[in-house]
Image (tube, grey):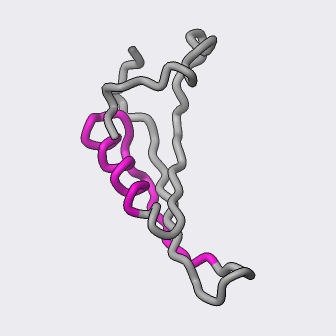
Amino acid sequence: MSCHITPHYFLLWNEEKNPFDEVIITGLGSATKIAIGAASIMEKEDIGQIIKIQTAYFSSDRINRRIPKITIVLKKHPDFVAS
């Protein structure tokens, strides 16, 4: 994952929109590592600051086990400038 590659399909017709003040990243199961990595990159690049991390277990009716879940809340870094 790189912060230097912009997903052009997402940015089409959104030039006039302001960046969000808060972002919530969640990961379920093996995606918890990806969620942690994405939040770490955003913090390292001074895009956002982690303000809350919450962990839990998700119980599924289809399988008889609990699946780890992580929720990470980031707020916009004060020095962030949208390009």
Total marks in image: 0
Front in this rendered view, residue 63 or 13: 63
Query: Percent from the top left, x then y, of residue 39?
Result: 38, 49
Query: Percent from the top left, x then y, of residue 83?
Result: 39, 14
Magenta highlight on residue 45: yes
Q: Is residue 52 left or right of residue 40?
A: right
Magenta highlight on residue 74: no
Farthest-out residue, bottom: 64
Q: Please report the residue visible at 49 percent of the width from the left and 71 percent of the height from the top.
A: 55
Look at the picture and state if 20 lies above or below 35: above
Q: Please report the residue visible at 68 percent of the width from the left and 79 percent of the height from the top.
A: 60
Q: Range of the magenta residues?
A: 33-58
Q: Please report the residue visible at 45 percent of the width from the left and 46 percent of the height from the top.
A: 74
Look at the picture and state if 42 lies above or below 69: above
Q: Is residue 34 left or right of residue 25?
A: left
Query: Percent from the top left, x then y, of residue 25?
Result: 51, 51
Look at the picture and state if 49 lies above or below 15: below
Q: Is residue 70 left or right of residue 61?
A: left
Q: Please report the residue visible at 54 percent of the width from the left and 75 percent of the height from the top.
A: 56
| Quadrant where the image shows the N terminus | top left
Farthest-out residue, front: 62
Query: Percent from the top left, x then y, of residue 79?
Result: 32, 26
Front in this rendered view, residue 15 or 2: 2
Farthest-out residue, right: 61
Front in this rendered view, residue 42 or 10: 10
